[in-house]
Image: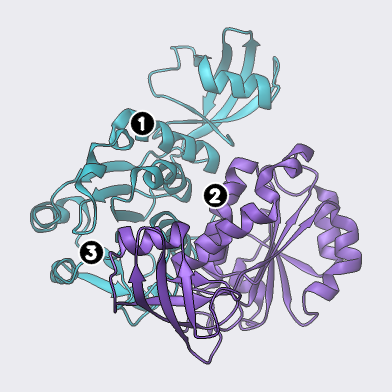
Chain colours: A cyan, B purple
Amino acid sequence: MNLILIHQHEPDSEGLVRLAGERAEHIRGVLKASHGKTLRIGLLNGPKGRGTVESVSGKEVVLRCEFEEKIPPQPTVDLLLALPRPKVMKRLWAQIAALGVGRIIIANAGKVERYYFDSHVLEPDFYNARLIEGLQQAGDTLLPEVRIIKELKPFLEDELNSVFPMSGKKLLADPSGEQNVFQALEKAEAANILIAVGPEGGWTPYELELFAAHGFRVFNAGPRILRADTACVALLSQLTLRSGANEK
Amino acid sequence: MNLILIHQHEPDSEGLVRLAGERAEHIRGVLKASHGKTLRIGLLNGPKGRGTVESVSGKEVVLRCEFEEKIPPQPTVDLLLALPRPKVMKRLWAQIAALGVGRIIIANAGKVERYYFDSHVLEPDFYNARLIEGLQQAGDTLLPEVRIIKELKPFLEDELNSVFPMSGKKLLADPSGEQNVFQALEKAEAANILIAVGPEGGWTPYELELFAAHGFRVFNAGPRILRADTACVALLSQLTLRSGANEK
């Protein structure tokens, strides 16, 4: 936990927040913070700031919060991910949030097993807790928006344009691509990017056509076939290297 | 399993191999292969090839192996990793192998808990099985060499030069770096690279000096603080983007 996230409703009118549970335990047990110590905090979907420890007890930790004026910039990368096995998805939420993504669109695909969608890993309480864990690790405050899409075609046809800006770049990782991710970006490096990552076994030819018809450009993520979680982390971190994206 | 790895001692003099256990289950249950079907195989630390199914029974699967002449090229990246929590390390072996690394040097550091070194995740039987899992996922045959280093200083002073070529580039990820990974590589993009990834909480100032004294150049992996497993996958995949590294 490199930053302690405070929910918007938690501070009282004097800027005091009373923490119990995991965050209090972290402050007591890991940071070993006592009265007067300042900690890195952030307001969920708001600015970062400093929390000064007012009191620590077995029951709660009280922080006095001061927030910066500026809210961190929105991530410029969105992710469309064919739902991997629940066990893999479970671990992936925090990693995606740590890498910094604006929207996470979890989609169905021909090679996704239908029953994966019944998993508790797709319940908002579950994934929001994991996403917040990733933000607290990475020192960010902006909670990714999550969409669960059980039908890919109507989503691409009817909703994609309202979710993702028309001016953005849509990319799809597939071994059939001849360019690497930067070549596919064609110097539009600072634009919003939506990156589609397929299921184990890849997209079907029909799905590849569907994506192409909706403006997705195919790129090749390299000769090695990566598991969905490794592929996601790999591709998102490659995108942070494009110019303009790596500034502090 | 995108490639089934065969150990060097397994094929008999006629090129037949009898598989039981996990590989046989995969061939029966996932690939649903029957007599005559050819499968992608590889010889551990040897060439890739094709295995033709001779017979399938509940007890075993018999493949006739034909291997290519050429052994896949050695990865040009080595990894020096401060040992993360065993739970994280457990998941990381397969991911590192999938991304393609020549050597994995697991090291102690000031901010590594000593008891981590007692974990079963550092036993060769455990990690070799996970590494092979990663190779089978990625379609590679070259098993990374693993070294476990409990004392960083004597390793850097006495052993590093015999393990890693003097002509190679040594890089270390730390927030104090001013360059990104490509800037730090200084166009030596095709060289052998050894990349050092620190523990949660980072390297100590003493360790940073020690690495600098042994030719490691510091680079900045971006403003976000990543968990060790995410950081490893992120950095290794960024290196695959350097020119010359992404060829098939």
Chain ID, mark 2: B
Q: Can you see residue B127?
A: yes
Task: Please rate how many residues cluster around mark 1, counting C-alpha atoms within 10 Å: few if below 14, some from 14 to 19, many from 20.
Answer: few
Does dot 1 land on a helix, a strand or a loop? helix
- Mark 3 vs mark 2, CA separation in Å: 38 Å
Q: Which residue is mark 2?
A: B91
**Which of the labelled discs sits on residue A109, or is there none?**
none
Looking at the rendered image, the disc whose residue lies closer to the viewer, 1 or 2, is: 2
Of the pair B71 and B186, the residue shown nearer to us: B71
Q: Is residue B35 left or right of residue B71?
A: left
Does dot 2 land on a helix, a strand or a loop? helix
Asked whether the residues under marks 3 and 1 belong to the same chain, the reply is yes
**Residue at image x 29%, y 79%?**
B36
- Mark 1 vs mark 2, CA separation in Å: 21 Å
Which three-letter amino acid code belongs to the residue tagged 2?
Arg
Q: Are marks 3 and 1 in contact (CB under 8 Å)?
A: no
Q: Which residue is mark 3?
A: A167
Counting from the top left corner in percent of width and height, residue A77 is at: 36, 56
Counting from the top left corner in percent of width and height, residue A218 is at: 28, 74
